[in-house]
Image (cartoon, grey):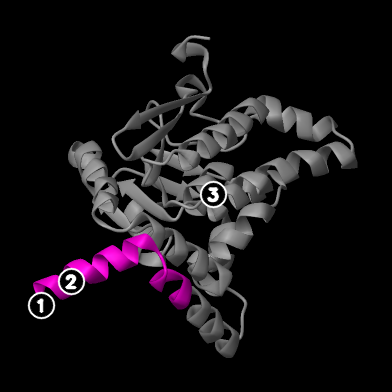
Amino acid sequence: MSDRTKTVLYTREASVGRITLNRPEKRNALNDELIEALKNSIVTAASAESTRVILISGAGKDFCSGADLSALRKISQASVAENQADARSLMELFLLIRRAPVPIVSAVRGKALAGGCGLASACDVVLASSDAQFGYPEVKIGFVPAIVTAILRRNVSEKRAFELITRGEQISAEEAKQAGLVNQVFPDEDFDAAVTAYVRAFEKVSKSAVALTKTLLYQIDGMSFGEGLQTGVDVNVIARMTADCKKGLARFLKKE
């Protein structure tokens, strides 16, 4: 299969696993094939020893416009069991991103809408071009942004989340950053270079420490304060025993 016919492209650049949604003629709309290919690419990238960060972007003008027409047509004709299996597939993708041992960064140019907005915000870090647009327009066709709501609610305030998912309006990259949906906004003309510099910075920190930190951050969600502290104690002890920590402490003490 040539790159032109692949729905997802995967390449390695030093410590960065680059995943590109490759349906530019469809604005990188989600379908079964793309979701499965995306899952496989994430597993491949995360399992490589040299990978420090995974970067997800879209080919062409837009990041991802959500479900494509064929997927929507399938939904309209599917049984309850078929719709449940379809929805679970997207859920599995979001869980895979959350549980991957390395940071996953989305680089958003153009539009990230509906499931595409969910995909972007499911990543650990969202980088946006100044021309990017975000939104959950599902309610305009009587649909519910149900799966992505679990992510959105953890990214922004309750009031802002309600507004975004019930009005179906698009917001700019700067508005998304102010809301907490986006980490950084870079000028469109400098976007590629700025994104590369951002993700390559993960080469300067400990891979094992980042993996433990990511796990801890998401694990304590929903815990009581005391449970969170105790989990922090457990992870603190594990971190002290890693090779990276022992080497780092040795270097620091030698400088002193």
Query: Under tag 2, what secondary structure?
Result: helix
| Three-letter code for the amino acid on which mark 3 is drawn | Ile
Image coords of residue 147 (percent x, y)? 67, 53
| Residue picked out by circle 1 | 256
Measure the C-alpha gap from mark 2 to mark 3.
33 Å
Which residue is at 17% across, 75% downward?
A: 253
Quote the CA–CA distance across marks 3 and 1: 39 Å
Point out the residue furthest to the left here: 255
**Residue at horizontal 49%, vertical 53%?**
101
Residue 4, placed above or below residue 189: above
The part of the chain drawn in magenta is 236-256
Pick the front one: 57 or 128: 57
Q: Does label 3 or label 1 sit earlier along the sequence?
A: 3
Q: Which residue does the numbered mark 2 point to in the structure image? A: 252
Q: Mark 1 and mark 2: span between their CA atoms?
A: 6 Å
* Main SS class of the magenta portion in the image: helix
- Whether residue 213 is in magenta: the answer is no
Where residue 38 sits: x, y (%)?
A: 55, 34
Residue 211 tag number:
none
Crowding around mark 1 (Cα neighbors within 10 Å: few <14, some 14 to 19, many 20+) is: few
Q: Which mark is residue 97?
A: 3
